[in-house]
Image: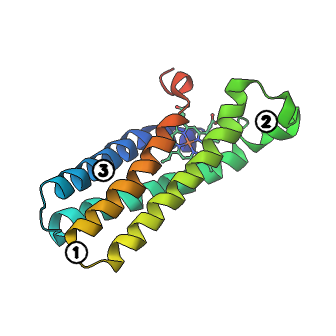
């Protein structure tokens, strides 16, 4: 439980970094009219997908085992959670699941296109939205404590 939280906490740096790299790469690819390569562009996007899914799995487990997750909702009721507790138990898990669904949709959609421009655009939009959603619900206070 403790180790899960630590893993989720450290992996967060990696996930945010790789998502940022994937989005920046897609935007510069689009702007620069670059080719979409397997060695670089495909790989970066796939890494970001995989790491987000590992974080999703850790987060889902945490939600069920941590006292700050489902247990908090059960104990206090939805209405009884203050804003910090609601962020951890409700908003962060819920919004991040949506974010990772968006990232996954972006990944599958980009593969359907042949043109580099469309691939980059799909990644930029879906990964970008996912990243913004994730950033909007990070428990910053608890993370840096
Ligand atoms: C890419 C997505 C995610 C990122 C970057 C992320 C990041 C974080 C960070 C930085 C913390 C604070 C850790 C700390 O206290 O040091 C946290 C806590 C937590 N996260 Fe996530 N998370 C993500 C996805 C999820 C998902 C999908 C779920 C659940 C479905 C989830 C459930 C939780 C829970 C329950 C906590 C509180 C743990 C505790 O205090 O015991 N996370 N997350």
- Residue 115 has which mark? 1
Decide which of tag 1 and tag 2 comes sooner along the chain.
2
Decide if residue 7 is in sight here: no
**Residue position marked by numbered label 2 in the rendering:** 72
> Badge 3 local density, few (<14 within 10 Å), some, or many (20+)?
many
In front: 124, or 66? 124
* Residue 116 location (% of width, % of height): 21, 70
Q: Which residue is mark 3?
A: 23
Q: Residues within 10 Å of mark 1 (few under 14, many from 20)?
A: few
Q: Say which of marks 3 and 1 sits in front.
A: 1
- Residue at (35%, 49%) from the top-left corner? 19
What colouring does the structure picture have? rainbow
Q: Residue at x 56, y 30 (%)?
A: 139
Q: Position of residue 129 (x, y in %)?
A: 44, 49
- Left or right, 114 with respect to 142, comes to left
Q: Quadrant of ligand 1?
A: top right
Q: Residue at x 67, y 25 (%)?
A: 84
- Closest to the camera, between mark 1 and mark 2, is 1
Question: Residue placed at 22% from the left, 66% from the top?
Answer: 117
Which numbered disc, 2 or 3, marks the residue closer to the eye?
3
């Amino acid at each position: 439980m403790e180790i899960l939280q630590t893993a989720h906490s450290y992996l967060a740096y990696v996930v945010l970094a790789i998502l940022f790299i994937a989005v920046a790469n897609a935007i510069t690819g689009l702007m620069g009219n670059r080719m979409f390569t397997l060695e670089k562009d495909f790989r970066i996007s796939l890494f970001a997908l995989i790491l987000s899914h590992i974080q999703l799995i850790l987060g889902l487990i945490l939600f069920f085992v941590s006292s700050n997750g489902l247990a908090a909702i059960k104990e206090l009721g939805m209405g009884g959670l203050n804003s910090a507790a609601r962020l951890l138990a409700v908003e962060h898990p819920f919004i991040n699941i949506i974010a990772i669904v968006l990232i996954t949709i972006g990944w599958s959609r980009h593969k359907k296109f042949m043109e580099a421009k469309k691939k980059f655009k799909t990644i930029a939009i879906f990964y970008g939205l996912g990243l913004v959603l994730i950033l909007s619900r990070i428990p910053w206070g608890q993370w840096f404590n």
